[in-house]
Image: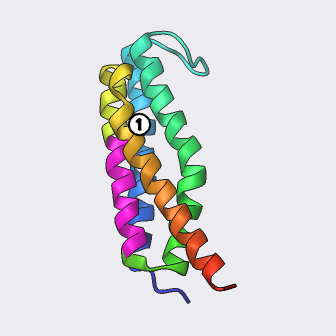
Amino acid sequence: MLNLPLTSLVTLGAIILFFVMGLRVAKARGTYSVPAPATTGDPIFERHFRVQMNTLEWLAMFLPALWLGAVWHSDMVAAGLGLVWIIGRIIYMVTYVADPKTRSLGFVIQMLATLSLILLTLYHIVSTFL
């Protein structure tokens, strides 16, 4: 059994953040009168929806990279980078909903955290063959 408590906590944090984003989309549906299954309507609703969908797109890369980083390098480093990813996604969410033109900082933070996990894991895997 793997003992990766920090990575497990960060994974739960990412899942909770995604859940909260889903709740924000549901609330925005009511606030801006966008009935399901519509995904367009009021621009503020669309921003909430895009934040949630963009996060889903990145979760598909981030979660495997997080766990591979924990297994191949360390629980603490992977969890630290995972926490940076969560912070980046929160910044992205807040700034994108306020004004999509201001989303870059949060996007770059989470992208670099994911890329760091990927490169760190790649380095450790390749180094086992050398």
Q: Position of residue 18 (x, y in %)?
A: 45, 46
Furthest-front residue in this view:
130
Boundaries of the magenta span: 77-90
On the image, the x and y values in percent for residue 100 come to 38, 21
Percent of width and height locating residue 95: 31, 29
Residue visible at 55% across and 79% down in the picture: 72
Q: Is residue 29 visible?
A: no
**In the picture provided, is 56 more to the left or to the right than 7?**
right
Residue 105: quarter of image: top left
Label 1: how many residues lie within 10 Å, few (<14), some (14-19) or many (20+)? some
What type is the residue that disc 1 sits on? Answer: Leu
Foreground of the two, 30 or 66: 66
Residue 9 x %, y %: 38, 68
Q: Name which residue lies at 37% across and 46% down.
A: 109
In the displayed structure, 125 sits above or below 118; it is below
Picture layout, residue 40 above or below residue 87: above
Q: Quadrant of the N terminus?
A: bottom right
Along the line of sight, the residue nearer the viewer: 18 or 23: 18
